[in-house]
Image: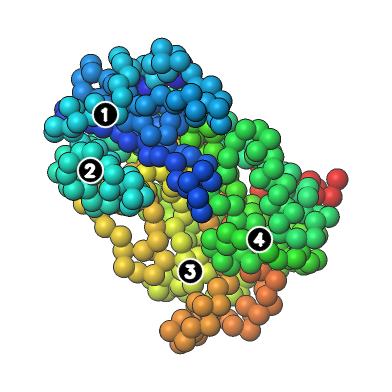
Amino acid sequence: MGLGMAILARRQGLMERFAFPVMFFSGDRLSRNFRANRYPFRASSHFLYFAGISLAGAVLYLEGDRQILFFDLPTADEALWHGEFMRRDQLQSLLAVAKILPKSDLAQYISGASTIPLTDPFQRLEQSQILERELTTPNQLTGGDRQLAEAIIDLRLSHDEMALLEIRRAIAVSVQAHKRGMSTAVTANTEAQVRGAIEGYLISQQMNCAYNSIVSVAGEVLHHESSPNPLHLGDLLLVDAGAETMNGWAADLTRTYPVSGKFSATQRDIYNVILNAHDQAIAAIKPGLEFHELHSLAAKLITQGLLDLGILKGHLDDLLSENIVSTFFPHGLGHLLGLDVHDMEDLGDLAGYASGRQRSKKFGQCFLRLDRPLQENMVVTIEPGFYQVPAILGDRHTREPFKSMINWDKLKKFHDVRGIRIEDDILVTTNNAQNLSHALFTKTDDIENFMNP
C-alpha cells in the first residue's frame, strides 16, 4: 500500500466514525531569538496521520468526498532561502486532495467544523481565531472536538500496514544507533560522547530523535535529558533513545549496560530480575489482555526477585498488597507507540485509558499510562525498571512504613545500581506478540560479548 492509498483509507475510516466536517491544523514553524532562526518543524500528529507529510502552515479539510488542503505555496523570495518547493499539482497528488486553496479561503469552510487543538498556546490562539470559537487544550475537549478525538483514537489504536512499515524502519535504525552507543561507551570519557554516537547515526540515516535522548549514569533520574557526566569504571549507563522517521513515526528503546563492558555481580543480579519481568510480560501479551494485568505481572516478578535477593523481607502477598515495588519501580510498564513516542498523549488519558476508567491515586500506579485491553496491531512499549531514587528512599514517609519490609543493610550492597531499565517495542499480533526490537540484545552475556569483541 502506497502513501496515497494509506491516507485515503485513513480518511475513509474517520468518515465512517465521525459525520461532521473536520479541520486538521499542521501548526507552523516556531522561532527562537529572532524570526529567521527557527526550530526544526514537526507537524501535529493528527495532521500527519491524515495528510502523510509534515507541511508547515497547512490545514486539511475533510467532509465526505470533499478533501481540501488550505496552504499558501511559498513565494519566490522564500525559494531563494529555502530552495524550490514542489508544484501545486505535485502537492495535490501527494496528499490525495481534490484541490488546494489559499488559507484566506478558510473562513468559507469553518461552519460546524471540529478540530483537535494544537498544543502550543500561541498557535492554538491563532487556530481559535480562524475557527471563530474558543478552543480548550487538547486534553480537555468537549462537544464535537471530543467526539472527533474519540473517533481518531478508535482508528489509530490499531496500526495499518503503512504505519507498521514506518515504525519498523524507525526501530531498525534505532537498534543500530544503540549498538553504536554500546561500542563507543567502552572507550568514551563522557556521556555526551556516547549520546553523540547514537544521535549522529540517526542523523546519518535521515531521521530525527523521537524525543530527547536519555544517556546517563544517573539512571535513577527517569528523564535525565542532559548528558554532562564523565564515565567511570563501575558505572552503569542507561540509554533511552529512539528514531523518528521523516513522516513522524517513532521508536522507543532503552538498554542499560556497564561502561567497562562487564557487569558487577550486584549489577547482574538486579539486571536479571528486571530482564525476567521484561521477558515474561512480553510472553504474556495477547489480544484482549488488560494492560494493567501486564503491569501487575511485572510488578509481582520484580517483587519476587528483590525478595529472593534479600532486598525485600516478608511474605510476597503482603509485599504486593502494600505495593512496595513502587519504591523501586515507580512508573508504569509501558505506553502506546506510534506517531508520537507516547502516542496520542496530547489527548490526556482519552487514548491510554478505556472509557470510564480513571488513574489510580496510589503512588506508582498513578503513573500507569495505559489501562485498556490490548488489540491486534497495537504497538506498546514494555519497560520495567529498578531505581534507587534518593527522594524516595530517603523520605521518612517511605522509610517508616516500609522499614520492616526493606533490608536497608542489604540494599547498601547494591550501591552500584542507580538505575536499570530495559525497553522494547511490541506489536500485538493475532494470538500473541512480536518483539519488533528483538535485534537489540538484552541478555548480560550478549551485551558483554558485544562490548568486548
Residue 158 shows in the view: no
Q: Residues within 10 Å of mark 1 (few under 14, many from 20)?
A: few
**Structural distance between the alpha carbons of marks 3 and 1:** 57 Å
Closest to the camera, between mark 1 and mark 4, is: 1
Q: Position of residue 186 (x, y in %)?
A: 81, 54
For the residues bearing labels 2 and 3, Cβ distance under 8 angstroms:
no
The residue at which mark 2 appears reads as 129
Residue flagged by tag 3: what amino acid is it? Val
Residue 91 shows in the view: yes
The image quarter containing residue 268 is bottom right
The residue at which mark 3 appears reads as 325
For the residues bearing labels 1 and 2, Cβ distance under 8 angstroms:
no
Closest to the camera, between mark 3 and mark 4, is: 4
The residue at which mark 1 appears reads as 104
The image quarter containing residue 209 is top right
Q: Residues within 10 Å of mark 3 (few under 14, many from 20)?
A: many
Closest to the camera, between mark 2 and mark 3, is: 2
Residue 227 marker: 4
Q: Residues within 10 Å of mark 2 (few under 14, many from 20)?
A: few
SS label for mark 4: loop
Task: State which tag comes first along the sequence, 3 or 4.
Answer: 4
Of residue 190 and residue 322, the one placed in the foreground of this image is 190
**In the picture shown, does residue 292 fall above or below 418?**
above
Q: Is residue 187 left or right of residue 304?
A: right
Task: State which tag comes first along the sequence, 2 or 3.
Answer: 2
SS label for mark 2: helix
Q: Residue at x 56, y 31 (%)?
A: 81
Residue flagged by tag 2: what amino acid is it? Gln
Q: Quadrant of the N terminus?
A: top left
Q: Position of residue 138 (x, y in %)?
A: 29, 48
**Structural distance between the alpha carbons of marks 2 and 4:** 41 Å
